[in-house]
Amino acid sequence: MSYLVEMKGIEKRFPGVHALKNVRFDLRPGEVHALMGENGAGKSTLMKIMSGIYARDGGEMFVDGNPVTPDGPRAAQDLGIGIIHQELSLMNDLTAAQNVLIGREPRKRLGRLDEPELNRQTAEIFASLNLDMDPRTLVSTQTIARQQLIEIAKALSYNPRVLIMDEPTAALNDAEITELFKVIEKLRSEGVGIVYISHRMDEIKRIANRVTILRDGAYIETVEAADTPLSKIIQLMVGREVTQKAPTIPDTSQSPVALEVRNLSRGKEVRGVSFDVRKGEILGFAGLMGAGRTEVARIIFGADPRDEGEILVAGQPIDIRTPHAAVEAGIGYLSEDRKHFGLAVDMTVRANVAMAHMEEFTNRAGVLNEAAMKETAIGYISQLGIRTPSDMQAVRLLSGGNQQKVVIAKWLLRDCDVLIFDEPTRGIDIGAKSEIYALLEDLAAQGRAIIVISSELPEVMRLSHRIAVMCEGRLTGILPGGEDTTQEQIMELATQRDSALRVAEDVL
Amino acid sequence: QDEIYIPLISKGFQHQFWQAVKAGADQAAAEFGVRITFEGPDNETMVDRQIDMLAAALANNPAAIGFAALDSQAAIPLLRQAADAGIPIVAFDSGVDSDIPVATATTDNVAAAALAADKMAEFLGGQGSVAVVAHDQTSRTGIDRRDGFLNRMDSEYPDIKVVSVQYGAGDQLQSTEVAKAILTANPGLNGMFGTNEGSAIGIVNAVREMASEGVTIIGYDSGKAQTDAIREGLMAGAITQNPVGIGYETVKAAIAAMNGEALSTIIDTGFYYYDQSNIDNAEIQAVLYD
Amino acid sequence: MTTTTVDAPKSTLSRIIAAGTHQRVLAFASLIVLLIGFSIASPNFMQTSNMLAILQATSVNGVLAIAVTLVIITGGIDLSVGTMMTFCAVITGVVLTYAGMPLAFGVVAAVITGAACGACSGTFVAKMAIPPFIATLGMMLILKGLSLVISGTRPIYFNDTPGFSEISRGSLIGDFIPSLPIPNGVLILFIVAAVTAYILNRTVLGRYCFALGSNEESVRLSGVNTDRWKIAIYALAGSIVGIAGLLIASRLNSAQPALGLGYELEAIAAVVIGGTSLSGGRGSILGSLIGALIMAVLTNGLRVLSVAQEWQTVVTGAIIILAVYADMMRRNKKS
Amino acid sequence: MTTTTVDAPKSTLSRIIAAGTHQRVLAFASLIVLLIGFSIASPNFMQTSNMLAILQATSVNGVLAIAVTLVIITGGIDLSVGTMMTFCAVITGVVLTYAGMPLAFGVVAAVITGAACGACSGTFVAKMAIPPFIATLGMMLILKGLSLVISGTRPIYFNDTPGFSEISRGSLIGDFIPSLPIPNGVLILFIVAAVTAYILNRTVLGRYCFALGSNEESVRLSGVNTDRWKIAIYALAGSIVGIAGLLIASRLNSAQPALGLGYELEAIAAVVIGGTSLSGGRGSILGSLIGALIMAVLTNGLRVLSVAQEWQTVVTGAIIILAVYADMMRRNKKS
Ligand SMILES: Nc1ncnc2c1ncn2[C@@H]1O[C@H](COP(=O)(O)OP(=O)(O)OP(=O)(O)O)[C@@H](O)[C@H]1O
Ligand SMILES: Nc1ncnc2c1ncn2[C@@H]1O[C@H](COP(=O)(O)OP(=O)(O)OP(=O)(O)O)[C@@H](O)[C@H]1O
Ligand SMILES: [Mg+2]
Ligand SMILES: [Mg+2]
């Protein structure tokens, strides 16, 4: 069978990083080819070369057997190669439709825009995605998940023959993923070749035909998805075996309450949310996209104002109006949107790690102790396995997953009593994921109260001692963690759209 | 509202010169029992701002208007509108090319600068090289003083060479830097003329900072720094106008015009040369300000 | 929330205005407050002649603000509008007075000169990747110098071109409705505003203004020739500046080569008071128009009240801050 | 890539300079080219006295540029530095001449006034969420007006304060090394630069400057009291402006209340020529210093060459663009 795209001997170097070493990759029409590897393995870099964003330092690339060197995104588009980037790159001030068809707006004479036609075409694309969105909504008002869907629509609007999806599902929930897979199925049946990058192992089995594995910028192997067990793929990725430990749920019912929230409300997003979390406990938050979990966290953290409600830390009511006050009270929050809210991406790893706890490195005259900062940063780099040439690398230049680890390091350093992790493993590879799980459990064991917001049900179930479920701004129930709770129970609460608040009897 | 209101639209208001004009106008206002306002744009390039000021002044039903035109033609339509409404206009500081103003209270800047040239030539014994630090390249006063000086040098003193004319916007600091650059470029320079207070002080600063010797400085206008420099002997002398007189005469003429009295079209308020020898004379003291 | 929201067009003009209005009502409130305040404070303020004077005073700054709005929406800034306006006026003077060509040539010369200067700035910004602040600061100085060079540091008068001063001072409307002697300059301001608003909200050029200001990299990655569009936007802004040059030349019946410095800040202030964000991506022409009006009402009102000039400055500064603060507050409350 | 890059401190001073140098070498090349060019063009240019004149001319603008650098690194802008400098000078005049207090009080008054004004702008920006452009534009006007009000639109002379003019004009260095009569003003400029560079690269305040400019929201969500730090940064910038006020007052031996407008653009230009990004997050004091020197060399050189004033303006504009372009090119090549 002839290849749609073939890449051979691809080399790419960045200052201090040999990102791709003699990598090969090929794609057939009508297949989903998964590209797997740990954070920083070089997946995004390889795909950026394929889509003309980076120039390769060495190697060859063929499309339909003809050698090509796309020198820009436009050239790649002309070759039929489209890409959905890992990091969102939308124009926030424009509407969904204006984003999707940017550069190809339907026009009337004299450069006038045909706005109704623009919206109609976009609506069609949305419909084909089963996406319920008004083409005229402003991108900036949408959550990351829905922005991700707009990106996908945009890539599809080019009718590409090759579609690269770099972690398209990182921000999506199960229902949306199902929709997306339907679209992928359809594209596949039309002969489109799809490169699929994801850290969600279960997806590989569901969707991929073949899997290519990269490790440390080197090509490892290409295997058939159907006849390779996941454990084998994981082993190829990390170069060792990863064991999934079954969760053990400690009894924390006697521990003091670390954080209590009473009747938290803000507009329609958060309505009368009350819960508590004890020292040593991991409270998971499940729910569908837009259920209001992030909003609850932001309110507790003082990032958004609240209309009503009380926050008690260690039994003391505390008036939190700013994140500063929250941190002073011992609450930390890892945002779900690291690029905008978690990191100063132009600054170094070292500076970002120290950001939330600058006092520790400052003497009374306000002078910084760089040596201590360096030591700390290097400590976390090795503890979390952050792949970076040095602690002085700008965070912008790290791979997505490694950026996420920097955020985690920042909050580990701050050492809060209550830590809220919003999608902590978004874009993190399977090896690092289990390390982070271990880390969270460790933190809990040390007596911290942990709140984990996650859209991955297996993750919530794997980690949580108790599971709070939200739907449309209300807390619809709190379930016990462990084997006894099933996905179905959680989904029931997560879709419980009536107003009756039902608390599953248990715990407390 | 039966008080008599006379707005004066000037070319500026922040500089000492204009403040002295205002003082004269205030004095006349108190004397004759009228209300005046005094307003001018930030710098002398803002022709259209001045016209907006004139328009706002007209809205307040003035009895007469005093006007120092930045551009003598630009304001004519508004002036005509005022004249049609029976509001007499008195020009001050520089004229308006039109017969609308009933009188003009002004200094003959060309003649004053020529006097500065004469004095400079006298100091230099009719030969040497001089430079000019002017305050503006396009405003009437800037042009008149520069050209008054240059033309007199050109016609009367062929052995005096004008080596450089540069502009410092009347800003003391900028004029200082300009003057220093001129001194650097022309090591044997014999004299410098500054066309207004800021320019003159700039020259004094430059000579002081570079410890230059043998440079004769002639200034223009007054102000404490300048009178001090003359007393110290750093500055040879300066031309002063009679700004207080200009302000006073403008208001006085406006009232006269309002009352239908006949006026001479030009009210020459005069200018004076002062130096160490006459700075304390009563006549000179009356026209100095600081 | 932002003015980019566009619905299916029905009555075009009303739509264009509506596109802006939604948000602009906010700055509008400040304007009304000022107008009412000054009317109460001085009986002389609310006269037809004074209202016309305010509009007349707005015309030049308003047109400049409109030009700057385009550039600011792309995320840039234009410091050269003041001296560019003068440069266009001087070129018109050369064409009409020195070369003695007919009026229409002068008008075309001003607009083309502006467009060329704008394209120049645009090229610096787009092709040479010079930050807009520096590119237009450089242009500001270059054009200031060239105006003086070309004019020989003397004003160029238009006495030989009959009708030139009518461009701004005459009143077409007044010819038909004598009770409404709105000067042509004001009429031109409104026409320029309407046309630019149309371009901004209804054409590809306008769309790319917002897109570039929102996320330039993403526009580029979408395969759009961003350089070309950016140059086009700066050139359009420049040609609008050319119109401002005509207006001021006509108003002063002369091209004043030294004028222009300082006008850029005033224009930018009007734009920001009007709610356009300096970080790009958001803004409206109607807002800038209202911003320019606020500035003009403020200056005029304080003058009519005979406030001492130094205090006028203080009050203007304070009110600019307050107006934007009020705007912020109301916007926050809405969202 | 960015100047935030800091290594473990060894020899502190050399380190501080090194922190900037890495990138700043770029702008430095333009400076050298200019110096060589002017030396060739005029034999009078490369004299000790003229070099001192250039340094002296840099002092005020250099200090202002340093102040503005801090604010620009946070992603803001400060248009008020020119009139704030004047305001500080006027307050010093009031303290020394009107109230007759001893010299030290005047110095302290200038710095405190500057800090207070800066804190004011900072509060507008941080607490009231007014865009820095507008907040400082407002402050620019307010301070301009207040300077005139307080001084009674008259210069305040310092004749009664012996030693005041020594602040800028005297030469401490010259007292020890007579062959090197570097004026105190220049010495002060370098001290201010060194101290500010230290603060910027070695203290929390400096770190937050860069962090705020990089991603303010993420800093806020790290639990940092961003409002307080922002106000502190503006206040620090203000106190540096106060020093500029002292320098100019001492140099002119008077507080000139009408001066100051226009200095802000020159300072900002120096900062940008020095490689500091107007979008925040990147920049260095050394760069701004070099930027200010480039501007001073340029003006002085053209004047020494007796280039006609209008052409001086044109050339300055062109060279500003070219300097930044060259900087861009070299930086692109490096990365
Ligand atoms: N522009 C750049 N400059 C320097 N280094 C870079 C740049 N882009 C990527 N890198 C480095 O190249 C390596 C590969 O990065 P890449 O983004 O391809 O990883 P990835 O496999 O996509 O990881 P993830 O799963 O975390 O997204 C990383 O070590 C990263 O730090
Ligand atoms: N910037 C915004 N502007 C307007 N509405 C928003 C914005 N951000 C979130 N919302 C809305 O607020 C509600 C709560 O969203 P939130 O992000 O808290 O949900 P979530 O449970 O964390 O979901 P997700 O999985 O998407 O993070 C949703 O209806 C969402 O659409
Ligand atoms: Mg990646
Ligand atoms: Mg969320």
Image (cartoon, coloured by chain):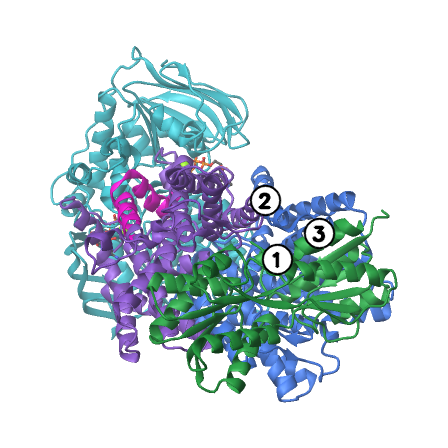
Chain colours: A cyan, B green, C blue, D purple
Badge 1 amino acid: Ala
Badge 2 amino acid: Ala
Residue D319 makes an appearance in the image = no
Label 1: which residue? B282
D196 in magenta: yes
Disc 2 on helix, strand or loop? Answer: helix
The CA distance from mark 2 to mark 1 is 45 Å
D162 in magenta: no
Disc 1 on helix, strand or loop? Answer: helix
Q: Residue at x 66, y 89 (%)?
A: C100
Circles 2, 3 touching at the beta carbon (< 8 Å): no
Residue B68 point in image, percent of width and height:
68, 65
Residue A288 makes an appearance in the image = yes
Judged left or right of residue B38, residue B2 is right
Residue A100 point in image, percent of width and height:
47, 58
Residue C243 point in image, percent of width and height:
63, 72
Highlighted range, magenta: D190-216
* Letter of the chain that mark 1 sits on in the rendering: B
The CA distance from mark 1 to mark 3 is 21 Å
The CA distance from mark 2 to mark 3 is 29 Å
Judged left or right of residue D255, residue A163 is left
Judged left or right of residue D286, residue D226 is right
**Residue A301: quarter of image:** top left
Q: Residues within 10 Å of mark 1 (few under 14, many from 20)?
A: few
> Same chain for marks 1 and 3?
yes
Label 3: which residue? B26
Image disc number at residue C318: 2
